[in-house]
Image (cartoon, grey):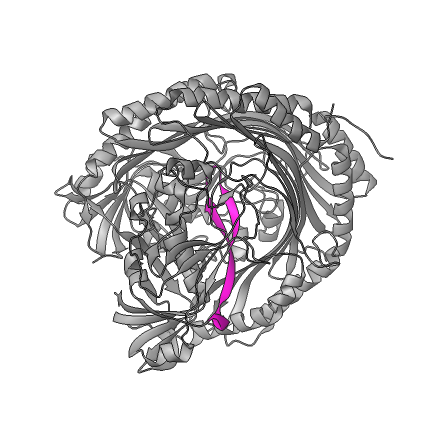
Amino acid sequence: MKVMVDKLDTENVIDLTIKKLQELSFEDYILQTERSNKSQIRFADNQITIVKNWASMDLGIFAVKNQKTVAVELQDLTSETILSSLDSLDKLVTSLPPNQNYMGISDGPFSYPFIDELSDPDLIDFHEQALDKVTASINAAQEEGAKRSAGVLYWDAIKVQLISSRGARAKAHSTKYEYTIRSFIDDTSSGAEIDVGRLSSRIDLEEAGKKAGRIAKMAVGGINGSPGKYNVILAPKVAGDIVAATPAAANPFSVEIGLSWLKDKIGEQIGPEFISVYDDALLPNGLGSKSFDDEGHPTGRNVLVEKGILKGFIHNTSTARKAGTVSTGNAGLVYPQNTNIFFEPGDHSFEELMEISKDKPTIYLTNNWYTRFTNYADGIFSTIPRDGMFLIENGEISKPVRELRISDTMFNIFGNIKAMGKDIKQIKSWEVSTPTFIPAVLLENINITAATS
Amino acid sequence: MTAEPIDLVEKAIEKGEKLGAEYIEARLVDLKSNTSILKSGVPELGAIFRSKGIGIRVLKDGGVGFASFNEMTKDEMNIAVSFATKMAEASGDKRTNKIAFSEEEIHIATYQAVGQSGKRPLELSPEEKISRLINLDKIAAEVETGAIVPFRFFQMIDQTEKKLIITNEGARIECETDLLQLFGLIVAVNPTTGSKEQLMIQKGKAGGYEALDFWKIEDHIEKEVTTLGKIVTEAKEAPKGTIDYVVGPNVIGIMCHENQGHPSEGDRILGREGAQAGESYLKQDMIGEKIGSDKVTIIDDPTLVGSYGYYQYDDEGIKAGPRYLLKEGIFQDMLHNRESAAFMQTKSTAAARAIGYNREPIPRMANTYLAPGDFELEEMIEDVKLGILMHNFTEWNIDDRRYQSKYVGLEAYLIENGEVKHMVRRPVVETTTPKLWGSVDAVAKKSLLEFDAATCGKGDPMQGAPVYHGGSFMRIRNVEVR
């Protein structure tokens, strides 16, 4: 019978979906609804270019019949679309061969951990304040000498509800903001900074503007650098991309499709003894923090690297059972996903990192982009420094350099960590999609190439 | 109460005009998509995606506001239009140089780019789709290469998108497009040395499942995997020093896209993407300047029938045609939407694309290629003393002004005294854009022209746009290889 429902609220959607899934005899299912309100202010040349708002209600379903696995994602939640999509899903599931990698979803019911600082009601109606804060940030960059700044402030409020056929019942409410500003003195002298978090009280766009402006000013007059082997100090933004790439590759799905360089490496020393890294879903204010994963399994803090040794991978129920272990609470709908990657900090100030490297040719990278791989399975890659890049001489920043590229392997990057800074920053940016808590990092003996002589 | 989506689009325009919008566009996008994922022969997932939503963009008082919604009610529409208008006013108020849209011819049009009967995405049975994919994996796993192929991943996505764009200026564009995309990641391993090489395959085309036959996909996979096996077992070290390169359609395509397509985007040149995709080494006052050799003509043409980046009218309702990014080496056209065109006091080049109802239309590429020349491939090779014939690439990257780029070869051969010799491993072209285009002295004939598909990333939030890029063969003289 066709059920007619007008604008569907979340409970209607869930009831209608479960009833239909049961009617179609799906053995297992997980459904997740998300009601969100997201906003964004973009700016360029010191002026706001556009203000955006997205209101959305989405439904995701993972379902299993005869060990065949299917999924549906709907951004069109009329009862007619829900029902017809589930009929299509049923046709699809009958046509597939069994998925031998599927080994079940997590058995509930569960109790979930409490995580502090996940949401802030003040971020829901934030537009007027946001315009003022962005303007203040642009002005701060200009006061440092920036001629023009571009950037984006994004913020959202999201309500998620999850129900599984195995007894998981979970709800979450979260907010977050992400800010990037990039300031220019001229075409090739620029600096960038980010500020991300979940609470409006922590937002400091003005400070981000100042830092971007300051780096841009320091970058003026840069000369083309020379290729060769260097020690390299990575700002947290860069370390969050190329140093955190190795713990992020501790994913069985990536290993199985050749997108990871960590196959058969568990138990091996892959970094120095002072490096420990976790996937930590419970960090207050962490953009990846959440109390349940996409199976409704409770999340937690899982060690990935301990004293430089690769200790384990993140898992969902299927990958865990296949590996003879238990879920780490990292289920995504298709493959395990990181929450927050957290690096234990070192005890060095930035000045001390420069001092440690004073006898070797050293370059300081404030930002990078466009990391690409010749071969993921061996971790052979290159990435391009972006914004202020500086030569370190005698333990101090001496002059700006340009037009260089890191061309090396991920094993060298992680294995050649010489020292870690003490000040951790949360990174999520254009290049770093997994929220990563990481300090500045000193690497030694890294290969640098150049397109220009 | 729910409402008919088309009524909401029309009412949104009325509402925007009542609120004083100088310009309002409403875009309804109804997307139906299916995905099959195969991991080393195992069907990991069959997935269905359905989305229907409306995006509203308003220009008022020199500012722009955008809002989207996917719950089809009059309330949601009213909230979206009011928000977009209010935010256009608020941001416009703070601007010293007001945003305007270029004056353009208004069009009312309907068009389709869909698959053959029985081969359309929603018509073909899931059984046929998955069995063809499983067969591709079998070919990759079983082909005799001398290497082992332990990592294999395939993903096939089909989609049918219906779109209606209406503006308060009277434009009304209705279109329906089918797209098919096939992605493959295959890694071959030398069983003796453990040495590995990866191959990424991306095919895409407007239309339905007839594309698989058009690509001769089974033969293609067999050939590519056989070659991959040879690379890990036979390829020798690539020469260094100053040498020539002859590069094929796959390499030319990515070079045209990265080194000339992106820097020609009007919004990048204006700095609007400065914090994300970056700016450009090109400037407005460089139009007419010589960037490359006479042999280099790079065209971006959305209207190539059957192409992955196909459209007749852009997402602002402007009629599309070929754009000459470089004409005989001279910088000629930019990729403009109406906003970037107005800032440069010119006309749109119909490059506005919005990937989804919830995205704003920004300048994008469509199908970018190097215009063929009149050389035979053999002719180009026989004139090379020491060089490399590079058919395709693995790693690549380029700085955010699109000035210094790097391309690492996959299938590549040594050229010595005009003859193609053994395979070489991972040759690198690391050079600047003007040096690259300035060093081209020969381009092969039209019969060798081929295209590859890609998903071009730009925007924030990210907008992955389907694009084609390609060429025939070109010769690059005196590349410094360190």
For this orientation, the residue located farthest to the left is A394
Pick the quarter of the image with the C terminus of chain B: bottom left
Q: Is residue B315 above or below residue B407?
A: above
Q: Quadrant of the N terminus of chain B?
A: top right
- Can residue A430 be spotted in the picture? yes
Q: Write down the quadrant of residue B291 in the picture.
A: bottom left
Find out whether residue B230 is within the magenta segment.
no
Residue B172 image position (x, y, % from top left): 62, 38
Residue A296 drawn at (x, y percent): 63, 35
Give the residue at the far right of this rendering.
A1
Q: Which residues are magenta?
A: B446-467
Q: Is residue A291 visible?
A: no
Q: Nearer the viewer, residue A266 or A187?
A: A187
| Residue depicted at x 36% and y 46% | A369
Count of marks placed on residues: 0
Horizontal relation, residue B467 to residue B91: left or right: right
